[in-house]
Amino acid sequence: PVEAITPPAAVVSDAPLPDLFNSDGYVLEALSGLFAHPQLAQWLVGEHLVQRFVAVIDALPNRKLSTHLWPAKPASGRFFVQEDAATTVIGPANSARYDAHVAVLTGVDTQAAVALYLRLYPLLQQAYRDLGYPDRHFNDRFVAVLDHLLAAPEPVAPVAVTLDDKGNWI
């Protein structure tokens, strides 16, 4: 349970949290301090950050996830594919689009991230309840989704892709 986690005292703020619907500036400032990257604000969708994060976490195990829910903007650049014999595969150069994002995420202080999660948890819980789960805990869903992601198999390159009926690579 979230209540059982004790963050380091040095990273816990006593300042009151804003209400959920006025939290974007507060959350963006807190994330900017955590990630310390000048482009972070450009990578995030600036409205309803908490609600978007909660909605994406809740929807991640599903087969489809609307890009309208994402708290972050898609990586820039085009999706690279290449022909490999009779199939189309994800091009090796495609991963370069994510290099800056990966570097920022892997450089985060884990204790500070946990402390921020705990600090923002009342907002996360409210957003989860607003999604239609009045008797459930967001942290339970978050842990279940993390377990789901950790259980996902590592794809073996090259990964074959095809176009769907709307012209999107799948």
Image (spheres, rainbow, N blue to C red):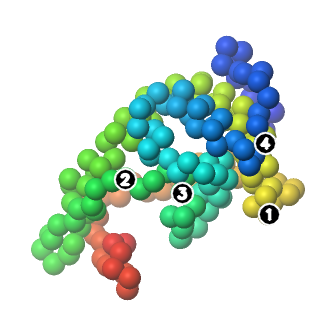
Using the image, tell me which numbered label, if any, was put on residue 121.
none
Q: Are marks 3 and 2 in contact (CB under 8 Å)?
A: no
Say which amino acid is labelled 4.
Answer: Asp
**Residue at the spot of label 1:** 132
- Residue underneath mark 2: 75
Q: Which residue occupies the extreme bottom position in the image?
A: 165
Q: Quadrant of residue 129?
A: bottom right
Image quarter in which the N terminus is found: top right
Labels 1, 3: front one: 3
* Image position of 146 with respect to 113: above or below: below
For disc 3, the marked residue is: 70
| 56 horizontally vs 79: left or right | right
- Up-down: is 92 above or below 168? above
Mark 3 or mark 2: which comes first in sequence? 3
Residue visible at 72% across and 31% down in the picture: 119
Given residues 32 and 4, the one toward you in this image is: 32
C-alpha span from label 4 to label 3: 21 Å
Query: Picture coordinates of residue 143 (x, y %)?
Result: 66, 47
Q: Tell me how far mark 3 sits from mark 2, CA to CA.
A: 12 Å
Three-letter amino acid code of the residue under disc 3 = Trp
Q: In this figure, which residue is indicated by the disc labeled 4?
A: 19
Amino acid residing under circle 1: Gly
Disc 4 secondary structure class: loop
Residue 142: where, in percent of width, then height? Answer: 66, 48
CA distance for labels 2 and 4: 30 Å
Q: Position of residue 65 (x, y in %)?
A: 54, 66
Three-letter residue code for mark 2: Ala
Who comes first in sequence, dot 1 or dot 3?
3
Above or below residue 141? Residue 103 is above
